[in-house]
Structures are given as structure tokens and as C-alpha cells.
Amino acid sequence: MVTFLITSFFILAFLAVAIYFWQKPSRSVTADVLPPPPGRGLFIDGTPEGRALVAAEANANANADAVAQHAELLERAGTGDKSTLLDARATGPDVYKEVLNLHIAGADSDPKLLSLVSYVTRHELPVNQNLAGAVIAAYKRSPDRGATAKALHIAALSDDAAVYQNAVEAALLFWREGRLAGVSALELRSILEGEFWILSAPTRSSGAGFLLKRTLANARRELEAAS
């Protein structure tokens, strides 16, 4: 009986040792099967250098997309696609000015310029000095009642006191020369003073705005005397 117990004890001890050594390499193999992920794992992207690299690549991709979109926008504007003005307005004032100037350069006739002005005003888009200058130049070539009101209105929308004064002086000159058939002194005075208030308060209060006010005051006296 004692011999049987001793033999059983040694057998159990042997089995315990065998099980221990059998499980140990199994765990090592499992650990080797799951190494840290290569490349951009948590170890790399979690560092300041890794985050900086990811951010730099994202910025580079965004800049490349912006350059491509800008080039496409200018190409469309060069073909006369006026919807580019809306896209450019949503992009920013500098891009809008660039695209608008392309359209102005392409408006090489009065009908094309009139179409451009109509699109801009219909969509309530900003008028820059170049567009107002082109309208005033067209007005000087062919002044009449309708062109007078349009030139003064577009000049006022440019929010530039010097540009508006240029339009005012042209209208007064044509009126004095009798080239504005159907435009009375009272009507011209009303147009000049009414469009003046489209200019922003800072523009009206500027140095150029002061000179404009003086011109309008002299025009008021002259037109009142004539009426």
C-alpha cells in the first residue's frame, strides 16, 4: 500500500513538471506571433515627430488641392464662365478680384461689358474699381440718360470716392454740353446725391470723400440755378 502511494506521488509530480514545460514555450510562440505593428502604429504617430509628419502631409495635400482648384477656376473664367464669380466669391476676396479682373479683360465690347455688369448686380456681387472704371469709360463713349444712371450707380457700388467723383464729373460735363437729352437739372441732381449714399460711411468720411462732397455741393448749386 505504501509503495503504491509513493509511486502515485512520483507519477503526479512527473505529470505536473511535464505540463509546466509544455505550456511555457506555447506562451512564447503566442507572444512572437503578435509583434508590434510596423510603420505608423501608435508608437510612431503618438510621438510629437509622428504627429508633425502627419500634419505636414495633410497640409501639403490641402495646398495641392487648393492650387489645382484655383487653376481650374481661372481656366473657366478665361472661357467666359460667369459662374466662376460665385465660386470665387465663396473662396475669398483676393480670388474674387482676380477672377473678376479676368472677366473685365474679356469684356472687349460694350454688350459683353453690359452682360458682365448685369450678372454682377443681379447676384449682388462686389464691384471693384476696374469694373467701375470700365463702365465709366463706356459711358464716356456713348453718354445718354440710361447710361448716366448706370455709370453713377456702378461707380457708387465700387465704394471708392475717387471713382465716384470721376463719374460725377463726367455726367456734369455731358449735361453742360447738352449731350444728356431728356435729363433735367433736377433729375441729375437727384441721381448724383442719391447714389452718393451708397458709399460706405468710412468712404464718405475719407479725404477723397471730402473732395467728393465739395464737388457735389458745387454741382448742387449749379443744378439748382439751372432748374
Image: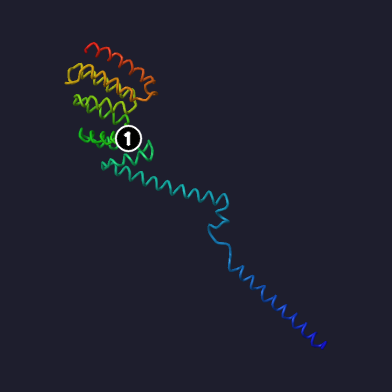
Figure coloring: rainbow
Query: Does 13 sit above or below residue 206?
Result: below
- Looking at the image, which residue is at 31% across and 14% down? 217
Task: State left or right for residue 19 relative to residue 135.
Answer: right
226 w.r.t. 88: above or below: above
Q: In the rendered image, which quarter is residue 208 located in?
A: top left
Q: Describe residue 102's horizontal placement relative to residue 143 as left or right.
A: right
Q: Position of residue 78 (x, y in %)?
A: 28, 41
Question: Which residue is at 33% across, 17% downward?
Answer: 213
- The disc labelled 1 sits on which kind of residue? Leu
Q: Is residue 24 above or below residue 85?
A: below
192 vs 99, nearest the viewer: 192
Q: For the residue carrying disc 1, how many other residues have a C-alpha within 10 Å: few (<14), some (14-19), or many (20+)?
A: some
Q: Nearer the viewer, residue 212 or 130?
A: 212
In-front residue for pair 106/158:
158
What residue appears at the point 40 percent right and 48 percent down from the top-left corner? Answer: 65
Q: Find residue 218 and report its image quarter.
A: top left
- Residue 105 sits in which quadrant? top left
**Mark 1 sits on what residue?**
125
What element does badge 1 sit on? loop
Task: Pinpoint residue 202: horizontal percent, then vertical percent.
Answer: 40, 23
**Viewer-proximal residue among 159 and 33:** 159
* Residue 112 on image: x %, y %: 22, 36
Q: What count of labels does the image hold?
A: 1
